[in-house]
Image (spheres, rainbow, N blue to C red):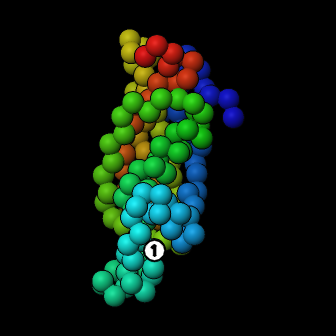
């Protein structure tokens, strides 16, 4: 995919919807890389023994999924900042949907603000975030 040009981006532009892979296999791979091999993330039965509905997607993985959505839309961009609020858990082996929308275009800094959400199958918002992004064409020297 070719990254959008700064001049072509407008407030209200939607990023392509993504369907993040939160399968047990992918979560275990992430948890291993992050040194977070904890049952609440990697085993449904261990998570249930803790009173949880099942294994949970780690919060930092949710944030990484939001960053990945931005990079799928604008390969090579620089995510200068990403703030995330975890409103509720995302369950491993569920089918979440991630969306983003451009909420500000700053001509002076040539940066974009993007609001991001991850919702579950019922359409309930689980994670919200805001990112400041500089597109690859504008990133050199920044």
- Callout 1: SS: helix
Would residue 74 be visible to someone looking at this image? yes
Q: For this rendering, which residue is in front, 102 or 35? A: 35
Quarter in which the N terminus is drawn = top right
Local crowd size for mark 1, using a 10 Å CA cut-off: few (<14), some (14–19), many (≥20): many
User: To which residue does mark 1 refer?
Assistant: 42
Q: Is residue 33 above or below residue 141?
A: below
Would residue 8 be visible to someone looking at this image? no
Quarter in which the C terminus is drawn = top left
Rendering coords of residue 101 (x, y %): 47, 38
Tell me where residue 95 sits by quadrant: bottom right
Q: For this rendering, which residue is in front, 63 or 100? A: 63
Rendering coords of residue 74 (x, y %): 58, 32
Residue at 53%, 45% (x, y): give it: 68
Residue at 44%, 33% (x, y): give it: 79
Residue at 39%, 15% (x, y): give it: 109
Tell me where residue 43 sits by quadrant: bottom left
Rendering coords of residue 118 (x, y %): 45, 55
Residue at 38%, 72% (x, y): give it: 38
Q: Is residue 42 left or right of residue 83?
A: right
- Number of residue marks: 1
Q: Is residue 72 above or below residue 106?
A: below
Q: For this rendering, which residue is in front, 116 or 67? A: 67
Q: Is residue 18 above or below residue 2?
A: below
């Amino acid at each position: 995919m070719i990254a959008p040009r700064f001049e072509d981006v407008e407030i209200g532009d939607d990023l392509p919807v993504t369907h993040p892979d939160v399968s047990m296999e992918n979560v275990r791979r992430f948890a291993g890389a992050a040194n977070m091999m904890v049952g609440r993330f990697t085993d449904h039965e261990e998570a249930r023994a803790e009173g949880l509905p099942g294994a949970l997607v780690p919060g930092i993985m949710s944030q990484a999924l939001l960053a990945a959505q931005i990079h799928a839309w604008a390969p090579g961009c620089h995510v200068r900042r990403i703030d995330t609020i975890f409103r509720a858990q995302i369950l491993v082996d569920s089918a979440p949907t991630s969306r983003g929308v451009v909420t500000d275009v700053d001509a002076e800094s040539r940066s974009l603000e993007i609001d991001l959400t991850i919702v579950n199958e019922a359409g309930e918002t689980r994670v919200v975030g805001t990112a400041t992004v500089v597109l690859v064409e504008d990133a050199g020297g920044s």
